[in-house]
Image (cartoon, rainbow, N blue to C red):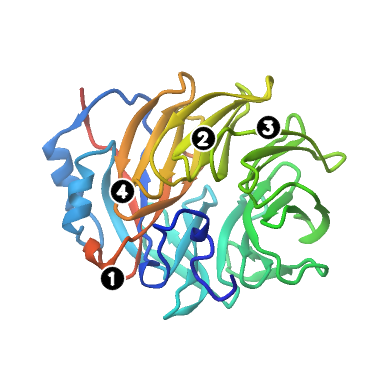
């Protein structure tokens, strides 16, 4: 899959696009502690749509009237925007992988409040996709699928401090990266059924967890129990890994199809799993080791994240073109927010703001040329 900018999106259905549809707007939904049935006041929508560096296309303006948030600002990014991270100090980092027409990727740093671009780091053929940050050390990590390595970058300066490789696997198809700040340990999934474990102090690969499963992608960590969870899309299961021994202790069926990403609510011992093909989310009780509920969300359920600040799980439904919001306590879907294009990745910063990357369907979507990073604010909700 080298040389294709859309290698990540190939895990979804045939509706995924490559090349010309690599533009990615990013939508941010403000925290919502209560999400009842609602409508949005026309005044709130109108005022929100006049804000920002780029005028909103008509389709995005229409979508703003259907969800729990409205666009406050947006700025150009990309090409080939994928994942995001935040240092908790006002900077937003966006990884871009390039496109067929514009090969080469890098990292863009924005002011999170104004979306003004502060710096850009070119990474060339590395074409970063996954991203994680240790806000304590200020080091960003990007997974570079085409290059088969991980780049460690000093977030403040943009300086590359290390390139991490596995000498036994030159073409590792790296996917997600997860950073445990407390232990300064970095985990990265490899679709071949392995997980890299990296010492964040030395930025070196210390061990590789083997025999995780088929097409390992999504990761979630529970530091309290010293367990790592990995979604195996090829087997539609979650592998539970004891980090002391490095072994899989049990495997739990998701009862879904093409199980992809994970979100953990450690307080309730519930693990949420997105299922692309079946278009739903499986909720696993980790004490009982079984699925206790399946929540339909929409076609191509992919990126997801749990937001403890307001007890919600956000799910990007790639084919449906929506972001579903799930009440983590009742396990009910409480809202579907329409998003232009193919929503792909969900990211939550330390304040509880939610970011979603979305691939454009076609040029007919009437979006501005190029990928976008968009900041959204919560309008007044009218019961």
x and y percentages locating residue 57 in the rendered image: 19, 59
Label 2 vs label 3: CA separation? 20 Å
Is mark 4 in CB contact (under 8 Å) with mark 1?
no
Viewer-nearest of discs 3 and 1: 3
Judged from the image, the secondary structure of the residue bearing numbered disc 2 is: strand
**Lower position in the chain sequence, tag 2 or tag 3:** 3
**Lower position in the chain sequence, tag 4 or tag 3:** 3
Residue at label 1? 369
**Lower position in the chain sequence, tag 3 or tag 1:** 3
Say few, some or many: other residues with alpha carbon within 10 Å of mark 4 (under 14 / 14 to 19 / 20 or more): many
Question: Residue most toward the right?
Answer: 245
Viewer-nearest of discs 4 and 2: 4
Say few, some or many: other residues with alpha carbon within 10 Å of mark 2 (under 14 / 14 to 19 / 20 or more): many
Label 4 vs label 2: CA separation? 19 Å
Judged from the image, the secondary structure of the residue bearing numbered disc 3 is: strand
Residue at label 4? 339
Say few, some or many: other residues with alpha carbon within 10 Å of mark 1 (under 14 / 14 to 19 / 20 or more): few
* Left or right relative to 239: residue 244: right
Residue at label 3? 252
x and y percentages locating residue 37 in the rendered image: 26, 24
Judged from the image, the secondary structure of the residue bearing numbered disc 4 is: loop
Label 4 vs label 1: CA separation? 17 Å
x and y percentages locating residue 65 in the rendered image: 19, 41
Label 3 vs label 1: CA separation? 43 Å
Residue at label 2? 306
Q: Quadrant of the C terminus?
A: top left
Q: Which mark is residue 284?
A: none
**Lower position in the chain sequence, tag 4 or tag 2:** 2
Q: Quadrant of the N terminus?
A: bottom right
Judged from the image, the secondary structure of the residue bearing numbered disc 1 is: loop
């Amino acid at each position: 899959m080298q040389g294709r900018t859309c290698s990540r999106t190939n895990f979804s259905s045939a509706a995924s696009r490559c090349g010309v549809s690599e533009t990615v707007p990013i939508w941010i939904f403000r925290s919502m502690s209560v999400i009842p049935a609602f409508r949005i006041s026309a005044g709130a929508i109108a005022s929100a749509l006049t804000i920002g560096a780029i005028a909103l296309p008509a389709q995005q303006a229409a979508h703003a009237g259907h969800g729990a948030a409205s666009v406050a600002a947006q700025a150009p990014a990309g090409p080939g925007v994928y994942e995001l991270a935040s240092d908790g100090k006002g900077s937003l980092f966006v990884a871009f992988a390039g496109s067929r027409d514009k090969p080469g990727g890098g990292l863009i740093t924005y002011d999170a409040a104004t979306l003004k671009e502060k710096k850009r780091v070119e990474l060339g053929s590395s074409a970063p996709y996954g991203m994680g940050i240790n806000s304590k050390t200020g080091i960003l990590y990007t997974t570079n699928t085409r290059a088969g390595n991980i780049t460690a970058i000093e977030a403040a300066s943009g300086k590359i401090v290390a390139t991490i490789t596995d000498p036994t696997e030159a073409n590792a198809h790296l996917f997600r990266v997860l950073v445990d700040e407390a232990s300064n340990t970095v985990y990265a999934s490899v679709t071949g059924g392995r997980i890299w474990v990296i010492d964040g102090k030395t930025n070196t690969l210390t061990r590789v967890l083997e025999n995780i499963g088929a097409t390992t992608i999504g990761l979630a960590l529970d530091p309290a129990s010293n367990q790592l969870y990995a979604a195996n899309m090829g087997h539609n299961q979650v592998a539970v890994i004891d980090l002391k021994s490095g072994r899989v202790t049990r495997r739990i069926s998701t009862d879904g199809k093409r199980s992809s990403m994970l979100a953990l609510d450690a307080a309730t011992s519930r693990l949420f799993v997105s299922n692309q093909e079946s278009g739903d989310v499986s909720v696993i009780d980790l004490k009982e080791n079984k699925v206790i509920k399946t929540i339909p969300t929409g076609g191509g359920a992919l990126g997801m994240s749990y937001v403890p600040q307001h007890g919600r799980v956000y799910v990007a439904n790639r084919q449906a073109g929506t972001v579903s919001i799930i009440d983590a306590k009742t396990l009910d879907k409480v809202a579907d927010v329409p998003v232009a294009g193919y929503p792909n990745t969900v990211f939550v910063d330390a304040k509880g703001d939610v970011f979603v990357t979305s691939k454009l369907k076609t040029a007919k979507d009437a979006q501005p040329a190029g990928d976008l990073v968009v900041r959204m604010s919560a309008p007044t909700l009218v019961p």
